[in-house]
Image: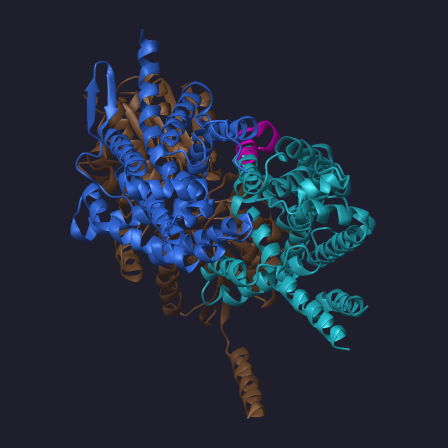
Amino acid sequence: MRTSLIALVLLALAALYPLAFPHLLSIAIFFLILAGWATAWDILGGWTGQTSLGHAAFVGLGSYTLAILANRYGLAPWWGALSGMALAALLAWIWGKLTFKLRGPYFTLSTIAIAEILRLVAIEEKWLTQGAEGVFIFSLEQPFGFDLFDRQVEYYAALLYLVLVLLLVGWLVQGKFGYQMRAVREDEEAAQAAGINPERVKLIAFMLSGALTALGAAIYAVFLSYLEPHDIFFLPLSVQIALTAIIGGRGTLFGPLTGALLLVGAGEVFRNTFAEANLLIYGILIVLVVLFLPRGLIGAWRYRAIRRRYARSAQR
Amino acid sequence: MKRILLLAIAVFCTLAFAQDTIKIGVITSFTGRFAEFGAQHKAGFQVALEEINAAGGINGKPVELVIEDDTSNQQAALAAAEKLLNEGVPIVMGAYSSSITNPLSQYFTRQEAPFLVFTSSADSITNPGSDWVFRINQPASAYAEVLFDVFDDLGNKSPLQTIAVVHGNGTFENAVADAAQQLATERGYDIVEMQSYDKGLTDFRPILNRFKAKSPDIIFMVSYSADAVAIMRQVKETGLSAKVFVGAAAGFALPEFLEGAQDAADYVITATAWTKDVNYAGAETLYQELKAARGKEPSYHAAQAYAGLLTVADALNRASSLSPEDVRQALAATNLSTTYGPIRFEDFAGFRNQNPVKMVAEQVQNGKFTTIFTQDGEVSDILFPAPSWD
Amino acid sequence: MEVFVAFLQNLSGGILIGGVYALVGAGLTLVFGVMRVINFAHGEFLAIGMYLAFIMHSSLGLDPFLAMLLALPFGFLFALGLERLILSHLIDAPEDSTLLATLGLALILSNTLLLLFGAEPKTLYVPYATATLRLGALTLSLPLLLAGGIAILIIIGLSLFLNFTEQGRAIRATSQNRLGAELVGINTRAIHGLVFGIGTVAAMASGFILMPMLFAIPDIGPGFTLKAFVVTVLGGMGNIAGAIGGGLLLGIVEVLGASYLSSGYRDAYGLLAFLLVLLLRPEGLFGRTVQRV
């Protein structure tokens, strides 16, 4: 109950942010999108326990689909975004079908390989993506008269996206499917013995994760207005998304969001003093988290809070 | 204590605002992958700023640069752009990498704020471009153009027909390779091989062996500096001989190329945006000043930053006011002579607000760069054809 | 005939490059085989090797192959320190942890290199940089030949060490069954340190060997880490001798693909082979079909 109240207050603050800081929207938009991506990643990575380091492929798919459909066929961006999501789900399904028999780190390695191959495809197949020349998004249909290139509109779109992802994940993990995901994460064989189909669970998780990532990517595409394969299908971006979720706390609702806040915030703080520190921070933090806070920040906090509650109730 | 601090800050702020300077926004990379180029830019700005303020600034007011570091990163650049517009600068200049400049140009176009590009070379920045984006430096296709001018010139001495192209798969390299393809068709050359490679590649031998089988007249390479060294070494090693070797990118024009490739670099012709041997007044002086400001060998990026700032100052001087539209109009009417070259903004061949200045071609002769070809034609003897490796 | 000679030329190029890939992969496969650690920072150690080669060449004028012999002991100690500091705490943690820890290490190392040296590529010039050896109608690059040759020698040395020395036997015991090894009195913690040291040193050696032909930039690491993974999977995780086969295969696949298909997709050929082996024969092409429990 208390978390919901805090969440509502934060949401209200977030909704008012553009009015208070109308000229600090770019960084906020990126934070919202990254938080959404990290939470989406977490569906597969935290709740189902399969670490993917290839999610940039979904970013690429989502953003390029919107751009290409808008440019070549004049398709409205919401259809473009939905198409991107559908394609992402399809990719996730094929990809998962092929690789989910691989356990743990082997799966992770395969995600890197597949994302890299897709990057090369995006560069080489110029007839589709215009290759390294890149794709501009010049004009888009305006829903209800909103100019999608206005930073304020993009901010609210991104905020809506994050809220949507959080609501979806929150609802998902409370239900039967959430239980199945956790079972698969903890012990696949035992889950199977309990009558759960691990492959099916992993596939659905992967499809959801990919589709939601693609949705955020559609917003990102409009934000940048220019896409280039090297920067979008970018391995370091995959790593950034995964580490954001892990540092914040895998398998928690607000963990990835916290991770994004911490890392984007730290990046901004250091930008004017010690910019190379940006990625260095990711590295140091992940090593510290792995060694001392394996559940991530929010995970560790929750763990202690729960233990305290049990201790208190046991003392009565 | 806190109150005194706040008061002091308030006074300081009012003082700062009261100071009458003309602010110009700059976005470039001081940290991250592109840090070296940001440093070159800084040297160029320094030299130009001294010149401008010594001459009285803009309409009597001194010029102040508001510099933002994009940390070689797109999102940071966009955040920086937002910040600069919020501070009310009448114009912004930037950046180094085309992957950063492209989103920036989109943003400034939408915000209807003038944006001057002085280094990024992707054709797409001004083709199609917009009313608000102006570029003083040559686009990527200009690299190919000057080299084909050289081919035409050399072709008078000994016929040149076939070309083999190897290029990195980045934006810039692709743009130059595409331009080469187009020019080859237009001017009657045959491209017998067009091979690309992914960054990080070190082994060009398969590609070079492929070229060897076709015995082309011209080997056309588009690579960044580290690859350039590796390619030339392997060209020598595989014994790939040809009449002309051209390196159509910055990598081949840097001192590191000579150090790394040593004697394999001889005879290579390369295109560059500016050298101290160009025919514009004051080139040698500018070179010395840039070298002093940079503390080491300056690259053409420094000269571009220098020219860019001069252009902006000139436009602001002529503008009837500092409103975006007035600044834009003043920019569009630019007709300036600088040591970098003439600065005008024209629309041609799909380009918009692009300065039609040409590139310069150099050749490595006896381990040193010699300017051989400018828009005036051949200015020095070209060593041709390149001897076979055996 | 021309076509055949060209094919042999390409093949030989692939074999030589494959030798180097084998060395890059051998270190990783050893570390994985014994410690079950997927070392994401493997390529960064290679990068460190390259930068060390550069520094020692530009300040002391040392030939990289010579410099390598001097620098490796320090590399070993450095790796030992890292293992003690970070990895030893994660022995019993879930498999993901070591992957993430080494990932973080990779970020730290590559960004430190960026801070120290900047992003501009560093090359060094040795007098034999473009020398070649003529073998009939084939032209072989001397530096590449040296690199491949030394790489194979190092791997053979490593193999001999593992199979014919007491320490080597202790290592193999630890890789087969850590608990069992402990029970017979092997200090597995020390073994882990030793193995990580050897693996890292192999990566650094590759860096020294490659420097004459390449250039050093701070983010050259991940590309080589990926290559090392491919070699490891192709050869079989933990299989040093298999790394030779895996490396050669990767080199040949890459070069032939680049020569006869499209060179833009060069890396994709290796990655596809990697995926196929991972999916169809995960114990590697040269491994025995034994299920690890």
For the C terminus of chain B, give its image quadrant.
Answer: top left
Query: Is residue B223 in the magenta section?
Result: no
Looking at the rendering, the stretch of residues picked out in magenta corresponds to: A116-130
Q: Position of residue A73 (x, y in %)?
A: 73, 32
Specify the colour of chain B. brown
Specify the colour of chain C. blue
Query: Is residue A118 in the magenta section?
Result: yes
Front residue of B105 and B379 = B105
Q: Identify the residue shown where x is 25% and y is 30%.
A: C149
Q: Residue furthest top?
A: C1
Q: Identify the residue shown where x is 71% and y is 33%.
A: A90
Residue B254's place in the image compared with C89, above or below, is above
Specify the colour of chain A. cyan
Can the viewer see residue B297 in this picture? no
Q: Position of residue A107 (x, y in %)?
A: 58, 39
Q: Position of residue C7 (x, y in %)?
A: 35, 15
